[in-house]
Amino acid sequence: MAITAGRDRVVLAMLLLNLGRVVDVPALVEALWAADPPATARAQLQTCVSRLRRQLPAGAIAHDPAGYRLTCEPDELDASVFARLVAEAKQESDGTKLRRALDLWRGETLVGLDSQAVRAAAAALDERYAAVAEDWAEFELDAGHDRDLIGELHALAERFPLRERLRGQLMRALHGAGRTGDALAEFRRLRAALHEELGIEPGRELQDLHRRILGGSDDQRVRSLPRTVGDFTGREAIVARLLESIAAAGPQGPAMVVIDGMAGSGKTTLALHVAALAGADYPDAHLFIDLHGHGEHEPAEPSAALLTLLRQLGIPPDRIPAEARDRVTMWRSELARRRVLVVLDNAHSSAQLADLLPTSAGTLALVTSRRRLVGLDGADPESLPLLTPADATALLARIAGDRVTADPAATAEVVRRCGGLPLALRLAGARLAHRPRWRVADLVRRLGESALPELAAEDRSVASAFALSYGQLAEPAKRMFRLLGVYPGVVLDGPAVAALCGLPLDEAQDTVDDLIDVHLVEEPAPGWYRLHDLLREFAATLAGPDRREALIGVLDLQTHAVALSMPEAYRDVLYRDLGSPVPLRPDLLAAITDPVARIERQRTHLAAYIEAAPATGRPEYAWWIARAAWWHLYYRHGGHGAEEMRSLLERAMSLMEVAGDRSGIAAIANYLASAYARLGDAERALELLRLSVRLREELGQRRAAATGLGNLAGVYEALGRFHECIDAARAARRMSALAGDRTRTRAPLSYLSEGYERLGRYPEALRYRRLSLLAAIEHQDHDLIASSLMKIERVRRLAGITTHGHRYLTAALRIAQRGAHLSVVSDIYNEMGNLLRTEGRYPEAMAAHETALTEVRRISNRRDEVDWQVDYAATRHAAGDADGALELLEAALAQANASRMRYSAARAEEGIAECVVGRDPERARRSWTAARATYRALGVPEQFRVELQLGGVDHLRSGEPRETMVR
């Protein structure tokens, strides 16, 4: 919109100059008419405001008893944006933001308004503009952009002819561009203007500059640092540490900062950012040299590097000695009389730096390298990490704009694919910035399966940066790097590296150390290694024909290493299932000191090993590794590992079906059933176990078939099908006997006892519990020893024998806790609660039940959790807390029905009836009736107890007293 009326423009200018503040009427009148307002001044002012209100958005001008106030959004007023950008620039030492602030100006402020009040305020704004322009010019001079500045500084000097700092900057730019005569002429021009206007001489700083230029002094300021990025992001803690390290050197000694990191990690950008922040303390010279440590050229010779640095200091070529030793002497002598900052970029080695590093007080060396410079004495190295996801997202947003924040999910995927590598993020951001119609999701699709081809712009690419590092490796390190690209997992240890490369362990560790030193391999924890995702992708493109042999070595080691994580008694069963394969590298297995910790570190990546097996021509490794990992997932992770276990075994089974490996299918089906059983899908578990038993029998694998039958008994027991449980357990014992195998009788003995216990046949249950204990002792199966002791006590309690019960449970708990078998520990605590309840020790009993529930929830064992809730409810009911018991029982019933646990559901119904019979006999009758139907179907003795209870509730309905049953 155009405001053309002169008075309207003055009023608007006054309101804008005081944005958000009330401007009183006398001030507006004075701005319009100075000291001679007409009698109708107020009325004319109101007319001006009315016209403005019609042209401005509604509500922009508000009336106040004292005057008027104008409001608008902060970014709608250039002056507000200018102030914000300047404040951010000073806080971040960012010259590009100063430039953006200056670009908001389109000439002198409020030109053409003939109002003394307006002109005074406009002059203050122009003064602010000039000060910011000087600050920006200082950034540019420090960066060595002398020639680029001359034109703009000339214009500023004409506009502000008496500003000495601005004229001095113009003189420095002219002198730096080789126009010394013009620089001296500018001094004379300013001196004449100051004499004529103010009758004074230029200030001391400008006179000193004039003398230095006039005398051609060598100590003039040198600025040779290259232009750096204006969107430096993150790294706040690192920058603070580096600045602290520089400050700690103090005035007495030279300061040195060493930054190392992988290709593309932003080492040079960080060094230049720190140089800009620390540069004011080193006013005489800011030097820069690329030492070509990792590039297409050979590393720079120290003598050639010294020639470049001395020339940057302004030393004429004919004065620089030819001998390297003499150049070192001159370099150190020149630095001794200056405060100098030098960036030694892309260093190749400590030896290359030896003669280049300053030795004088008042100097700072910023060194960058892709290699860890371990031979550099006195260095405090900073290994540059990757950007955090938050910083990576912020960097992408600064490059590509609002599209990044508009689609957070796609942005997170780009950040993940770039792996926090600044070079990759910059190239990805550049692709978006130059394609304004692209969404971030479009870039995600372009990245596809392989990100490297997309992370390129003109002659810059992530792949080429990696190639430079790879090209300088020795051949053994090159071969290892190539093979690391085909390693199926994410992290690997020394034995895995040795197996992959077919090397002795010591040699493998020495070679991987070489790769760590040049940041091609990371060491996230001592003795554990990984490749950045983009480096892995790059390495995979280099892999040769030896990849198959390398993968076989890794998969074989993984199979046997995972086997080491299980107790020896279970390991024997595993190797019989696998056909007793002999490890290819027993020397590497011997070097694995903590196999449990090893599999735990690699647990979430086990699927990658399974997926890699078919490509080796040895698909059996897929089910071998899955089978070996089962024990760790099942026993050490319980229910939390059930879904993980199911996914792993399902994938192995599908691969075996493709390969036609019936033995592998049978083995995996047996263990996959345990995952489904733990997840509450008993029908699928039964289906898999029947498949496993059928295939085992067809293959003549009677021992393995006996295992499947024993597991079948376990699922029947969980379903409350106790007669079928006993039949399957007996069949398992018969099959073991036919196979001549006494080692596989432990599970069938346990399930025989469980079935007889549920059917109320306690003498038989006790006999099989004792046989199970003997078998466990014979095979040193400590978990089964603890479980058997606890269950012997439970059968005795149910049979009415309570003597020595606590001795059984105390011994069982001690053994179970030693083995960290959470399921058994939980079982023991629950039985402690039951025993204490029979003794009337309710507070102790409830504490034991609560501990049992805490433990069972840690492993997400749904069946046990339901049963423990029912037992805990019985204890709370006995203690007089019927409401608390009812709440537990209703939760247990819902879980039992959802998981089709019929026996557990019947127990919950029975408990609910006990809780509500006194206040809701009808509901009690319904619950007892449901429980009786299930108990009858299962053939368990609880049906007779419920019959009596139903008779009692019928008496209550007819008004006759009910006989209370003592349980």
Image: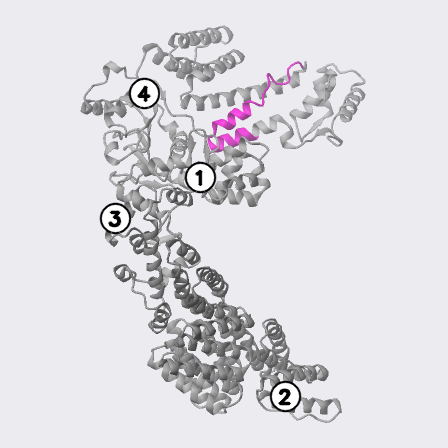
Q: 10 Å neighbourhood of mark 1: few (<14), some, or many (≥20)?
A: many
User: Residue at coordinates 33% horizontally, 39% vertically from top-left?
Assistant: 470
Residue at mark 3: 510
Residue 378 falls left or right of residue 715: left
4 or 2: mark nearer the eye: 2
Give the distance between the C-alpha atoms of the residues marked 3 and 1, in whole angstroms: 29 Å
Disc 4 marks which amino acid?
Answer: Gln
Disc 3 or disc 1, which is closer to the eye? 1
Mark 1 or 2, closer to the camera:
1
User: Bounds of the magenta span?
Assistant: 84-112
SS state under label 2? helix
The correct choice, above or below, for 544 with respect to 917 in the image is above
Mark number, residue 946: 2
Q: Residue at label 4?
A: 312
Instruction: Find the distance from the CA under tag 1 to the CA under tag 2.
Output: 71 Å
Residue 360: x and y in percent read 26, 29
**First of labels 1, 2 by sequence position:** 1
Q: Looking at the picture, how far across and down is residue 81, in whole percent?
A: 59, 29
For disc 1, the marked residue is: 452
Disc 2 versus disc 3: distance between alpha carbons? 73 Å
Q: Which mark is residue 807?
A: none
